Image (cartoon, helix red, strand yellow):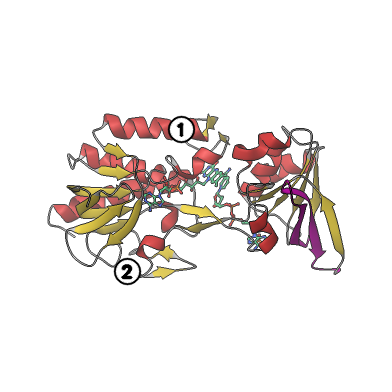
Amino acid sequence: MGDTRHTRVLIIGSGPAGYTAAVYSARAMLNPLLIQGLQPGGQLTITTEVENWPGDTHVQGPDLMVRMESHAREMGAEVISDYISALDLSKRPFTAVADSGMTYTADAVILATGAQAKWLGLPSEERFKGFGVSACATCDGFFYRGKEVVVIGGGNTAVEEALFLTNFATKVTLIHRRDTLRAEKIMQDRLFKHPKIELLWNSEVTEVLGSDAPASVTGVRTHNLKTGEIKDVPCHGFFVAIGHAPASELVKDQLPLHNGGYVVVEPGTTRTAIPGVFAAGDLTDHVYRQAVTSAGMGCMAALDAERFLAGGH
Ligand code: FAD
Ligand code: NAP
């Protein structure tokens, strides 16, 4: 049996929502504990340039998150490297069990577990994960110096990944299932102008092609949804950038979820269906999903928790 620690406010997650909640609840003298999870700093640690964080025209995602962590620590939050594997919200104090064996009890919980990359769900994608199939160009792009790669998706992430991969690859093919992108116009503009990027519209990937011993990707099989044409696109790396799903596993049987797993909060607040449990950031937001909106919700969650602990609601 591990030890048990009690805290007034337990923050689960170390993205912009979690760290902002930590800054605010520390400044409210609530001595919060923040559990970082497997991805300290959250999703922005797997990107490069962030150009829409107010006050910074250019900032590297990982640098921004290091600064947020320092800020939270300096204000008095305790930041703990651990992962919550079970959470009991059925009675107070709430109980969270961590991978380290530690049990945390808390008077209020702020859920800020964000989102995780989605996969296509193909058996061949699973087979080559880590051997040519990736969901993170920042992490794996370097392996494709002088090689051809394919990116699938049509949102900001896919376009960013494609542009970033031009730093290494000789050619980047972006495959999208429709004929218009969802990404911001400024990003689309950069994509269309790039000489190394080719677009394959109205197409889906039906199989990742490769060989064993050693496991490696040799291409992807595509199906044109308009013409029915089947075409193989040669590549060494296949980057899946089709969006993210909320990380609501911990609470899926305890809190109402909607729109594919996002935690429901009372409109205009971060209050969930259980008094004393608050949710912020991408975990609860299927619409905006930005660093700045997540940070904003982290602030709201800390203020909501402070009010709850003071006896309000
Ligand atoms: P996340 O950043 O998703 O963080 C979730 C945190 O929860 C992680 O620290 C994780 O370790 C932790 N966690 C999860 N489960 C557990 C658990 N069980 N126990 C403990 N901890 C747990 N937005 C912008 O505004 N500008 C951009 O330029 C931009 N670029 C992006 C580029 C990429 C490649 C991606 C993927 C996203 C980008 N976004 C951008 C979106 C932005 O990153 C997210 O909106 C934001 O990070 C969400 O913050 P969050 O705090 O809700 O969660
Ligand atoms: P997203 O906006 O949800 O886009 C996902 C893309 O993948 C869509 O184009 C979608 O196609 C496609 N897709 C989904 N499922 C698919 C499947 N099974 N097969 C093939 N294609 C599929 O996700 P995102 O690009 O990761 O962005 C998530 C959020 O983070 C957004 O709010 C975004 O603005 C934000 N973000 C911001 C920045 C930035 O500001 N620079 C950078 C990255 C991310 P359809 O278009 O047909 O639906």
Q: Quadrant of residue 19?
A: top left
Query: Which of 103 and 6 lies nearest the eye of the viewer?
Result: 103
Residue 156: image location, x then y, percent? 62, 48
Please check the rendered image and state whether residue 209 is part of the magenta-colored stretch, yes or no: yes
Query: Which of 2 and 7 lies nearest the eye of the viewer?
Result: 2
Mark 1 and mark 2 lie on one chain; the one further toward the N terminus is 1
Residue lying farthest to the left in this orientation: 311
Disc number at residue 203?
A: none
172 in relation to 202, above or below = above
Residue 26: image location, x then y, percent? 23, 38
Tell whether 305 sits left or right of 156.
left
Visible residue check, residue 171: yes
Residue depicted at x 40% and y 68%? 257
Residue 104: image location, x then y, percent? 23, 51
Residue depicted at x 22% and y 63%? 275
Disc 2 marks a residue whose amino acid type is Gln
Q: Which residues are magenta?
A: 202-227
Disc 1 marks a residue whose amino acid type is Leu
Disc number at residue 64?
A: 1
Question: Which residue was labeled with disc 2?
Answer: 254
For mark 1, give the secondary structure. Answer: helix
